[in-house]
């Protein structure tokens, strides 16, 4: 289902194409490194949604929300460059070696959430997607770890899909968007999903797709540049103020793009929680303290921003992410972490791989 598992036509388990497990020969003197923010695209999913009215409407929606210039650049430059890396394991493994990444934690391209799908289609889309990612991980042990997805538009279905992803397919959790068809992640209907995620010890990677800001961000690629981090900020705020993190303290949530803007300004959330009764209706715990229960990737581009993130949430809550293979990704992870002021070698090793290994239960790391 995932394109080009091997170059010999013999399938994903081809021994000739299976890379060596990362070890001293590959790692040299650098720390074990896990990239927790990487994407794959499953072409078989596109075959399932082809011809659906909602899929046919996508180009128009993209032009309206992103702007003609950004759509044109994506179609001519960004997407053609990304497509092979999204679908070809050889390109992926070569890039990992060049970046000094031992393990990629792969999750679906957010373009394939398809929360508009009806129950029958949603069942098939998620099954195909999760099985393809599980197959990819099984074919490349020690290099690829998988996160699946779930049809949050049907919470009962999403619970069953999450359970199958973890218990049967061996995935470490799922990736979800920052809202679902206008409903927030704190919506009461999603409580069973969060309860199941906690019970399974599943990692939930929150990654936005677009923004709800409408025309205000449909020029200059603002839809992604500021819109997507803002969506994560809003989503995390709903989980905090909506009481989800209090209700399920064992949740393992990873926030894309450094958690958006929320970790840069936690004092305002704390102040509102202290002085506004409606802000504290459902949240039992200081919002600034709850930020330390979430993990954050390093897609913040500069060492000063990483340093600030560490100061707010602690070294233990920061994991490497690149946003592979899109052009908004940051790929010099060793240079980035090496440039963060005030870190010692154990701190750098924790951020580069130790924290992710502990979060995901990667053995022998």
Image (cartoon, rainbow, N blue to C red):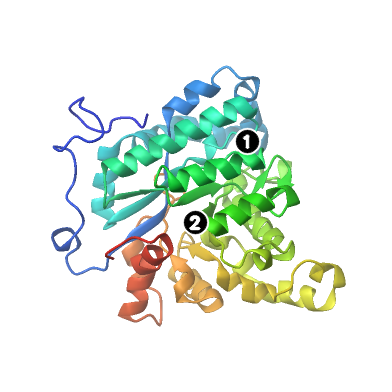
Residue at 54%, 74% in the rendered image: 313
The alpha-carbon separation of the residues under discs 2 and 1 comes to 20 Å
Is 280 on the left-hand or right-hand side of 17?
Answer: right
Query: Which x, y percent locates residue 253?
Result: 54, 60
Query: Which x, y percent locates residue 53?
Result: 65, 20
Is 20 on the left-hand or right-hand side of 164?
Answer: left
- Assign a secondary structure to mark 1: loop
User: Dot 1 surroundings within 10 Å: few (below 14), some, or many (20 or more)?
Assistant: some
Please identify the quadrant where the N terminus is shown: top left
Query: Which x, y percent locates residue 30?
Result: 23, 68
Is 230 on the left-hand or right-hand side of 315?
Answer: right
The reply to whether residue 23 is in sight is yes
**Residue at the disc numbered 2:** 203
Residue at 65%, 52% in the rendered image: 231
Say whether disc 2 or disc 1 marks the residue closer to the N-terminus: 1
Determine the residue located farthest toward the right in the rendered image: 277
**Residue at the disc numbered 1:** 115
Query: Which x, y percent locates residue 28?
Result: 16, 65
User: Dot 2 surroundings within 10 Å: few (below 14), some, or many (20 or more)?
Assistant: many
Q: Using the image as rendered, state which of residue 339 and residue 22 is in the foreground.
A: 22
Residue at 40%, 68% in the rendered image: 355
* Label 2 close to label 1 by CB (< 8 Å): no
Q: Disc 2 or disc 1, which is closer to the eye?
A: 2
Determine the residue located farthest toward the top in the rendered image: 51
Is residue 77 positioned above or below 315 on the image? Answer: above
- Assign a secondary structure to mark 2: strand
Residue at 17%, 38% in the rendered image: 17
């Amino acid at each position: 289902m995932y394109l080009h598992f091997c170059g010999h036509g013999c399938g994903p388990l081809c021994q000739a194409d299976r890379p060596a497990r990362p070890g001293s020969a590959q790692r040299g003197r650098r720390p074990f490194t896990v990239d927790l923010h990487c994407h794959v695209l499953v072409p078989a999913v596109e075959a399932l949604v082809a011809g659906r009215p909602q899929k046919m409407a996508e180009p128009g929606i993209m032009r309206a929300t992103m702007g003609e210039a950004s759509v044109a650049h994506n179609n001519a430059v960004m997407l053609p460059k990304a497509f092979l890396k999204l679908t070809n394991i050889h390109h992926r493994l070569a890039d990992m070696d060049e970046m000094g990444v031992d393990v990629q934690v792969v999750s679906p391209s957010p373009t394939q959430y398809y929360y508009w799908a009806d129950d029958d289609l949603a069942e098939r889309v998620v099954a195909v997607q999760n099985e393809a990612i599980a197959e990819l991980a099984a074919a490349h042990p020690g290099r690829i770890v998988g996160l699946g997805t779930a049809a949050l538009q049907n919470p009962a279905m999403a619970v069953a899909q999450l359970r199958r992803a973890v218990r049967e397919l061996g995935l470490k959790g799922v990736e979800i968007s920052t809202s679902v068809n206008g409903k927030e992640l704190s919506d009461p209907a999603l409580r069973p999903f969060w309860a199941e995620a906690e019970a399974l010890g599943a990692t939930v990677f929150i990654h936005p797709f677009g923004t709800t800001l409408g025309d205000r961000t449909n020029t200059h690629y603002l839809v992604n540049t500021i819109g997507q981090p803002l969506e994560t900020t809003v989503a995390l705020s709903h989980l905090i103020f909506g009481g989800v993190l209090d209700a399920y303290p064992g949740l393992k949530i990873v926030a894309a793009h450094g958690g958006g803007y929320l970790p840069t300004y936690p004092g305002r959330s704390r102040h509102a929680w202290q002085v506004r009764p409606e802000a504290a209706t459902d949240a039992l715990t200081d919002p600034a303290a709850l930020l330390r229960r979430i993990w954050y990737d390093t897609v913040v581009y500069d060492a000063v921003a990483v340093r600030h993130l560490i100061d707010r949430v602690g070294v233990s809550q920061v994991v490497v992410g690149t946003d592979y293979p899109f052009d908004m990704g940051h790929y010099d992870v060793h240079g980035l972490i090496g440039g963060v002021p005030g870190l010692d070698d154990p701190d750098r090793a924790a951020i580069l791989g130790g924290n992710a290994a502990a979060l995901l239960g990667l053995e022998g790391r």
